[in-house]
Each structure stands twice: as structure tokens, then as C-alpha cells.
Image (tube, coloured by chain):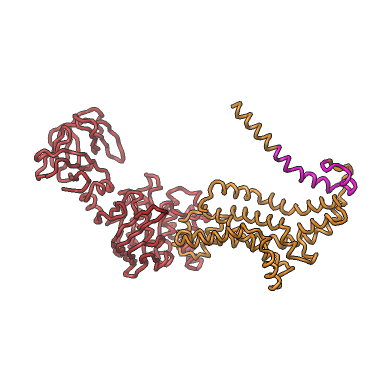
């Protein structure tokens, strides 16, 4: 009993140390945004502000408002569409895996490959394609490009969650004369909601944080997304540190809120990855 | 309803280098409105046969006909399961956990695009028949096993199928409610004159539901016939065991008697073998202190080892006094104390003889 207690304490201490390491940048981001620019440059980064001011938030808000809205306009449809289509693809592969294993395996390999190719490598053809379709420098163009990369990711993730549904339920639904569409929406989808939400949160945060795509696929400042706008604060002539920190906080708020509201599904989904996952 | 015909059906599963022949040239015919039971050990290929009839599994070879119409051909499903107008009650009932019992039962009707009022009428009607009206608003996880089973049955019957397939539908039920569930299925089957195929490893399911049955051993039908014929005239030791309790004991042939320890069973025909297996069902044996019982033959003295009770019958385990390792299970009308010695009687005409490899010789 005693040795178990000691073990527990040691593990707990290790966890606390890791948590502190992880929290340091977050902490400095939070406190430095409330300093004046002079204090942010002159005082150590971990020291709390002597004079508490929200002036930098007020200055930054004006510039971050538009990118914040842009990012929401982009990230929500990307997360939603790629997860829905990803789940449909995963369901398709799950159903055909028995009757046509060759189709399922080949399709699956292609999807996996798509998620492993660095998207920088496909940049030139993508820009050419978007330019010729008139999608370059537009919301649709950004959504399209992000969908290309996150749909396979979502399909891959969902194909870990889908096999949790017993095959006999799908068979029962077929015998009950349900069409594939009905089977998907009435049986498969309701039973995979935790996995669906986990995947959607993952894709949402990935596309929210994506810096490269909006950087190269947009040129007008009105289309800037959060990561690009944030980068603009570290200008070529000098950095306004307190403003950068405040902008970073604003940039993090949406993913943070999403995670706080839906985080338990994310954790539950991850737990399913460890335990119930099979057939991948 | 529908007549089901299966011809030379073969199903081979290949998993890597493993090849499993689940069904080997199976043929059978189930007439319109008839009930057929498929009996066999687990892993014997019963469920695979049923799944092929349902259209969930593609046959490797052979044909399945519904009313002379081909529904499955080699490596091909010609009529998809959703168009076969059949219902399948799964072993674990396969109720949709995300729907209430009402929605579960209504699901096949909604898929038929039936008007809401008609769906409501039918669901209420069937749930009254099956006595689950009070749980319609509950989810499957909130109701008892018996109610889940009846809900699955209701879902199967509500769309008026022409063929009902049952895959071990009673094995997940408590013993007390199993009999009433069997009686209910049989009653509905008779009322609707519904062609029914039931798969089970439990002979009680087959006896209560099916008129005819086939016994599958390692993917092959070894015997097909009326259920009482299968029970009384099994072609092999395996079949006799699958159809119910039976004592199988090795005996030595000495002239016109079979000797088992100190027991001697007189036999009026000549047997060429020196060793046989004697099969007698517990109900065809009795034990008594008196030396004769009408219609029974006294075969010698035994000692009662265990005396138990189940479902209105006292069950005894007895051994010949010369050899404790040989055991017979015998039914008795009264309780008999273990340790007592008595005479063992059998009904000679009910005795079955098998050769050493289990084939029936007499």
C-alpha cells in the first residue's frame, strides 16, 4: 500500500512538471498581453505585469476582428464537410471490405498516402489549378484546398471509429429494407457521434492553425486568416511584443472554447482509438 | 408465403492460407408455410447457411431459389437481401441502440415509406400481440432480455415477411422464459402460416419450432427428416447426441449379449463386431429394486452415484457395481439416495448400436 502511494506521488509530480513545462508559454502569452509595450520588452517574460492594462487588446482587436471572422468562415465548413465525407468514405470501405477486399485495400492505401504527402509538395499544381478555376484568393479556394488535405485525414480517423459499429446492425438494417443513405444516417452516424466530434475537432483545430495554405493561396489583406494576421505583428522594423501576445490570445480563444465545450468527446474518441479500434 | 430451395450450396472461406469449408454441397427444400430446423454444433456451418439464405453471404457454389426464382448463384447475389422480403432475428437481436423500441419496430415500415398512421397502427398491433406495448418508449438497453427478444421478433414480423429466419433466437434468454418465447414464436408462425427456418444447437428449439430438421456436421447435412424420426432413428452417434441426452457406453459382444462390466444386454440378432457402442436415452432406462418391469429388460445391478432434480424429473447417475468409471444417466420418478444398489432396466427396442467410429449399425 505504501509503495503504491509513493509510486502515485512520483507519477503525480512528473505529471505536474510536464504540465508546468507546457503551461509556461501559455502563461507568458497571457500575462505579457496585459503589459505596456515598454514593460513587455524591459521585464523578464515570466514576470507578471506591474501595471495591468488592456490597451494592447484594444489596439489589436481592430486588426484581428476580420481575420477572426475569416478563420471561422473557413475552418467550420472545412471541419464539417471533411468529417462528413470522411465518415461516408470510411463507411464505404468498411462495408466493401468483406465483399471486395481489393477495392477496400487499394482505396485505403491511396487515402493513407494522401495524408502522408507534405502539402508543400503539391503547392504549384494546386495554385495553377485554383488560378485556372478562378478560385485563387477566395474563401471557396481556401476551403477547397484545405478540404483536399483534410478529407483523407478525416476518412482515416473515421475508419478507426466506424468498425466500433457491429456489422450485424448494418446487416439488420439492410434486411429491414433500408437504403445505404438510410443506413448511414439512421444507424451508422448516430452511433459514431463521439468519433465524429473528435475528428471534427481535430480537423477544425488543424485548419484553424494552418499557416501555409492561407499564406500562399490568398493575397488580399481582407482575406487574411488568423495565423497569417498573427504573423504580421512581428514586423520587419521591430516587434510590438505586447500586441503580438494579445493577438496570440485572441487567435487561441476559438480553438480553446471549442475544446472546452467538446473536449470530452475528443478524449472519449482518443480512448476509443486505444481500446476499441480494429480493422484498420 | 415462399418456398425455399437450396441446391448444392457450398461456401468456402479463405483467410490467408486457411481454407474453411463452411458449407459443403448442401441441398434442402422448405415448403411454403413449413418450418425447418437446422441443428448442429457451433462452428458447424449452420449460421453460414442461414446467412446465405438471407443474402448476406455470397455462395462459393450452388444455387438458392425462392419459389423457383434464383436469388443466389455461384459468387453472385442475384436478389439483394433488402429485396428478398425476409426477416432475420439475430442471435443477439441486433436492435438499434440509438432508437427506442417503437422506432426499432417502425424502422422497416419507415423504409417502405408507409404513411405515419399506418405505421403507428401496425406497431401498436404487433406490440400488443407480443406484450411489449409498455416499453415502446424505452431504449433497448433499458428493457429486459425477454422484451428485447420480443422487440426483435416484432421488428421481424411487422413488415409481413414471406420468410422468417431465426438464428439461435432463444440462446440469450433466461431458461424460465425460453419456453414461453418458443411457444409464442410457434403460435405466430402457425397463425401467419409463415415459412420459417430456425438455426440452433439446442434440440429444444428445434422440437418446439420445427416440423422437419437437418443436422449439419462439419458443413454437411448428415441427416434430414422429421424431428421425431431424427430423435428416434439417428444415423450416427453425433446426430443422436445433437438431438438430446443419450448414454453412449462401450460394450463387448459375447455371442448374443453385449457386456458392459457386470451388466449384460441380451440381443436377438447376430453382430459381427466384437466391440460396439450402446446408445440409450435416459428416458428409456429405469432403475428398480424389483427384478422385473413390464416392457423393460433387467440388465444387471448398478449403484446410484448422484441423484439430482431438474424440471420435474429426478436424474440419477448410476454405475455398474463392477466398474465405477462407466456412467449412465437415468430418469427416475422418485428420489433415490446415492449409494443404493438396484437393478437397471432398459427398453430393448429403443436401444441404438453404433460401431467404434460412431456409425449406426442397428
Up the image or down, B290 lies above or below A36; here it is above
Q: Is residue A65 left or right of residue A168?
A: right
Does residue B278 belong to the magenta stretch? Answer: no
On the question of residue B205 being in view, the answer is yes
| Residue at screen point 76% across, 42% down | A24
Part of the protein shown in magenta: A17-46
Q: Within the image, what quadrant is residue B307 found in? A: top left
The residue nearer to you, when weighing B280 against A76, is A76
Q: Is residue B327 left or right of residue B52?
A: left
| Residue at screen point 85% across, 50% down | A241
What percent of the width, then of the height, locates residue A239?
86, 53
Furthest residue toward top: A2
What percent of the width, then of the height, locates residue B281?
22, 43
Q: Is residue B148 left or right of residue A210?
A: left
Does residue A32 belong to the magenta stretch? Answer: yes
What color does chain B have in the rendering?
red
On the question of residue B208 being in view, the answer is no
What color does chain A have in the rendering?
orange
Q: Within the image, what quadrant is residue A126 found in? A: bottom right
The residue nearer to you, when weighing B181 against A72, is A72
The residue nearer to you, when weighing B100 against A31, is A31
* Predominant secondary structure, magenta span: helix
| Residue at screen point 53% across, 48% down | A276
| Residue at screen point 25% across, 56% down | B224
User: Which quarter shows the N terminus of chain B?
Assistant: bottom left
What percent of the width, then of the height, locates residue A154?
61, 58
The residue nearer to you, when weighing B277 against A215, is A215
Up the image or down, B351 lies above or below B82; here it is above
Amino acid at each position: 500500500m505504501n509503495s503504491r502511494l509513493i509510486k502515485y506521488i512520483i507519477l503525480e509530480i512528473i505529471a505536474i512538471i510536464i504540465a508546468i513545462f507546457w503551461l509556461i508559454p501559455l502563461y507568458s502569452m497571457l500575462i505579457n498581453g496585459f503589459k505596456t509595450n515598454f514593460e513587455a520588452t524591459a521585464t523578464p517574460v515570466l514576470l507578471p505585469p506591474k501595471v495591468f492594462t488592456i490597451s494592447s487588446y484594444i489596439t489589436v482587436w481592430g486588426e484581428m476582428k476580420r481575420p477572426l471572422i475569416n478563420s471561422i468562415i473557413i475552418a467550420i465548413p472545412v471541419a464539417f464537410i471533411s468529417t462528413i465525407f470522411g465518415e461516408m468514405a470510411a463507411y464505404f470501405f468498411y462495408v466493401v471490405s468483406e465483399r471486395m477486399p481489393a477495392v477496400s485495400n487499394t482505396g485505403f492505401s491511396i487515402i493513407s498516402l494522401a495524408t502522408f504527402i507534405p502539402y508543400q509538395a503539391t503547392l504549384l499544381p494546386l495554385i495553377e489549378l485554383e488560378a485556372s478555376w478562378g478560385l485563387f484568393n477566395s474563401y471557396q479556394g481556401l476551403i477547397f484546398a484545405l478540404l483536399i488535405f483534410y478529407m483523407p485525414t478525416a476518412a482515416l480517423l473515421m475508419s478507426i471509429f466506424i468498425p466500433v459499429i457491429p456489422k450485424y446492425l448494418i446487416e439488420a438494417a439492410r434486411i429491414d429494407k433500408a437504403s445505404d443513405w438510410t443506413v448511414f444516417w439512421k444507424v451508422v452516424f448516430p452511433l459514431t457521434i463521439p468519433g465524429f466530434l473528435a475528428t471534427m475537432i481535430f480537423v477544425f483545430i488543424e485548419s484553424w492553425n494552418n499557416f501555409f495554405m492561407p499564406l500562399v493561396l490568398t493575397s488580399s489583406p481582407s482575406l487574411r486568416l488568423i495565423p497569417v494576421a498573427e504573423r504580421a505583428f512581428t514586423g520587419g522594423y521591430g516587434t510590438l511584443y505586447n500586441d503580438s501576445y494579445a493577438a496570440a490570445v485572441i487567435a487561441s480563444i476559438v480553438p480553446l472554447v471549442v475544446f472546452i465545450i467538446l473536449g470530452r468527446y475528443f478524449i472519449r474518441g482518443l480512448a476509443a482509438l486505444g481500446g476499441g479500434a480494429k480493422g484498420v | 408465403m415462399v418456398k425455399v430451395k437450396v441446391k448444392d450450396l457450398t461456401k468456402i472461406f479463405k483467410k490467408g492460407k486457411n481454407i474453411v469449408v463452411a458449407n459443403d454441397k448442401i441441398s434442402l427444400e422448405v415448403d411454403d408455410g413449413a418450418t425447418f430446423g437446422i441443428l448442429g454444433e457451433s462452428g458447424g456451418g449452420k449460421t453460414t447457411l442461414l446467412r446465405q439464405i438471407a443474402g448476406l453471404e455470397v455462395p462459393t457454389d450452388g444455387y438458392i431459389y425462392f419459389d423457383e426464382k434464383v436469388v443466389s448463384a455461384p459468387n453472385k447475389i442475384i436478389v439483394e437481401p433488402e429485396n428478398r422480403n425476409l426477416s432475420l432475428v439475430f442471435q443477439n437481436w441486433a436492435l438499434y441502440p440509438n432508437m427506442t423500441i417503437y422506432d426499432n419496430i417502425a424502422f422497416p415500415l419507415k423504409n417502405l415509406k408507409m404513411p405515419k398512421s399506418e405505421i403507428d397502427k401496425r406497431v401498436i398491433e404487433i406490440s400488443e400481440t407480443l406484450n411489449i406495448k409498455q416499453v415502446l418508449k424505452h431504449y433497448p438497453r433499458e428493457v429486459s432480455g425477454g422484451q428485447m427478444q420480443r422487440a426483435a421478433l416484432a421488428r421481424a414480423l411487422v413488415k409481413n415477411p414471406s420468410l422468417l429466419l431465426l438464428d439461435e433466437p432463444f440462446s440469450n434468454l433466461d431458461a424460465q422464459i425460453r419456453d414461453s418465447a418458443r411457444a409464442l414464436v410457434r403460435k405466430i408462425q402457425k397463425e401467419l402460416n409463415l415459412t420459417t427456418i430456425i438455426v440452433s444447437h439446442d434440440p429444444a428449439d428445434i422440437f418446439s419450432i420445427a416440423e422437419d430438421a437437418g443436422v449439419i456436421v462439419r458443413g454437411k447435412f448428415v441427416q434430414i427428416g422429421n424431428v421425431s424420426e431424427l430423435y428416434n432413428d439417428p444415423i450416427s452417434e453425433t446426430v443422436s447426441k445433437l438431438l438430446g441426452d443419450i448414454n453412449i457406453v462401450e460394450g463387448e459382444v459375447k455371442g448374443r449379449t453385449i457386456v458392459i462390466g457386470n451388466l449384460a444386454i441380451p440381443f436377438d440378432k447376430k453382430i459381427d463386431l466384437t466391440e460396439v457402442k450402446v446408445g440409450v436415452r435416459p428416458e428409456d432406462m429405469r432403475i428398480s429394486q424389483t427384478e422385473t418391469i413390464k416392457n423393460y429388460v433387467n440388465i444387471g445391478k448398478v449403484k446410484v452415484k448422484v441423484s439430482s432434480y431438474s424440471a420435474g424429473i429426478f436424474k440419477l447417475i448410476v454405475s455398474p457395481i463392477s466398474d465405477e468409471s462407466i456412467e449412465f444417466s437415468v430418469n427416475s420418478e422418485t428420489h433415490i439416495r446415492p449409494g443404493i444398489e438396484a437393478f437397471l432396466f432398459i427398453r430393448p427396442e429403443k436401444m441404438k448400436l453404433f460401431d467404434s467410429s460412431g456409425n449406426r449399425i442397428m
